[in-house]
Image (spheres, grey):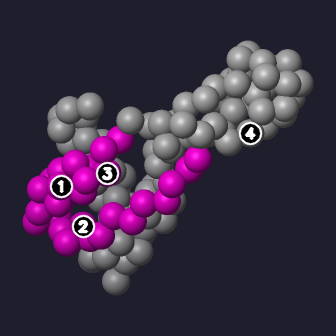
Amino acid sequence: MSVMHEMSIALNILEIVKEESIEQRVERVTEIRLAIGEISGVARQSLEFCFSIASKGTVADGAELVFENIPFRAECLACGSIFRVRDYKISCPDCGSKEIRTVSGTELFIRDIEVE
């Protein structure tokens, strides 16, 4: 992933935060809790860096990004088992099938915004 990817995400987060702060009449955002899937492709340090640059002079200037990890989970299409995928071993631990669908781990969303 490139820094441009994270900058685009940072700008989207900032836009949402700014809209919410206007709607809620908030003067300062202190913390933004993000839920990020293990396989979302987001580089957290790059996102923090990009957000710190993008948020300068805004309601979110100095706000801390707090990350909640969402594990990579899959459902076996053969037996219906739902399991955590570890080390990218993508086969069902119950029946061994490789026919799976992703249940979680690709997400990226704002869980909560803390304000003053």
Reading the chain from its start, which is encountered first: label 2 or label 4?
A: 2
Instruction: Mark 1: give few (<14), some (14-19) or many (20+) Cα within 10 Å.
Output: some
Residue type at tag 3: Arg
Dot 2 amino acid type: Ala
Identity, as a three-letter code, of the amino acid under mark 4: Phe
* Residue underneath mark 2: 60
Seen from the viewer's position, the closer of residues 23 and 113 is 113
Residue 83, numbered circle:
4
Q: Which residue is mark 3?
A: 44
- Quadrant, the N terminus: top left
| Residue 72 location (% of width, % of height) | 59, 40
The vertical placement of 71 against 103, above or below, is below
Q: Are marks 3 and 4 in contact (CB under 8 Å)?
A: no
What residue sits right under mark 1 in the picture? 49
Q: Which residues are magenta?
A: 42-71
Marks 3/1: CA distance?
A: 9 Å
Q: How many labels sit on residues?
A: 4
Tell me which label, 3 or 1, sits earlier in the chain.
3
The answer to whether residue 101 is above or below residue 69 is above
Q: Earlier in the sequence, mark 3 or mark 4?
A: 3
Q: Please provide percent x and percent y for residue 32.
A: 38, 65
Q: Is residue 1 visible?
A: yes
